[in-house]
């Protein structure tokens, strides 16, 4: 259980290995960095869950995915400025006994997310 994320590169049809991600806690309009990491070959945090069940707290969070830097590193020619740069997903955790999985499907031109399992 806890909190996890997974990123798939829909342009290339693969996990977004090497993408940089930051996790923030948010409260009263203030975002506080909790951790930053680079996705592994499977498009996941190499350290496992972002929070395990014991560490996850009810509240609001933000995941920031560095999409433009990832696609530039893959050799994709992007306009200046890129259409998508940093993709931010703000979400809430109401029940810490449930698993919150925040997947991201991303290309240079679009993204989608949902509460996964």
Image (cartoon, grey):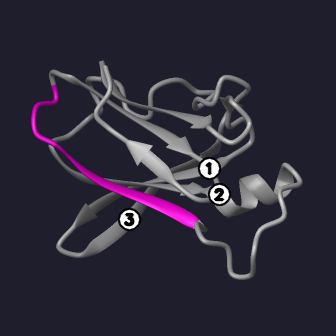
* Quarter holding residue 108: bottom right
Marks 3, 1: nearer the viewer: 1
Camera-side residue: 55 or 18?
18
* Callout count: 3
Q: How far apart are marks 3 and 1 (CA)?
A: 27 Å
* Quarter holding residue 115: top left
Residue 98 lies within the magenta run: no
Circles 1 and 2, Cβ within 8 Å, touching? The answer is yes
Circle 3 Cα neighbour tier, 10 Å, few/some/many (<14 / 14–19 / ≥20) = few
Check disc 1 and report the residue beneath it.
107
Please tell me which of labels 3 and 1 falls first in the chain: 3
- Compared across the picture, whether 20 is left or right of 2 comes to right
Q: In which quarter of the image is the N terminus?
A: top left
Classify mark 2: helix, strand or loop.
Answer: loop
Q: For the magenta stretch, what is the residue range?
A: 86-96
At 58% from the left and 66% from the top, the residue drawn is 84
Check disc 2 and report the residue beneath it.
108
Camera-side residue: 84 or 35?
84
Q: Residue furthest bottom?
A: 80
Q: How far apart are marks 1 and 2 (CA)?
A: 4 Å
Marks 3, 2: nearer the viewer: 2
């Amino acid at each position: 259980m806890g909190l996890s994320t997974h990123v798939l590169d829909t342009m290339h049809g693969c996990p977004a290995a090497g993408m940089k991600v930051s996790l923030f806690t948010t409260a009263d309009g203030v975002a506080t960095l909790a951790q930053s990491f680079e996705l592994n070959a499977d498009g996941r945090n190499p350290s496992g869950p972002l929070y395990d069940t014991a560490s996850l707290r009810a509240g609001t969070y933000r995941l920031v995915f560095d999409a433009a830097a990832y696609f530039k590193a893959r050799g994709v020619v992007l306009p200046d400025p890129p259409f998508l740069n940093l993709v931010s997903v703000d979400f809430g955790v109401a029940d810490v006994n449930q698993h919150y999985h925040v997947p991201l499907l991303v290309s240079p031109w679009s993204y989608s997310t949902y509460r996964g399992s």
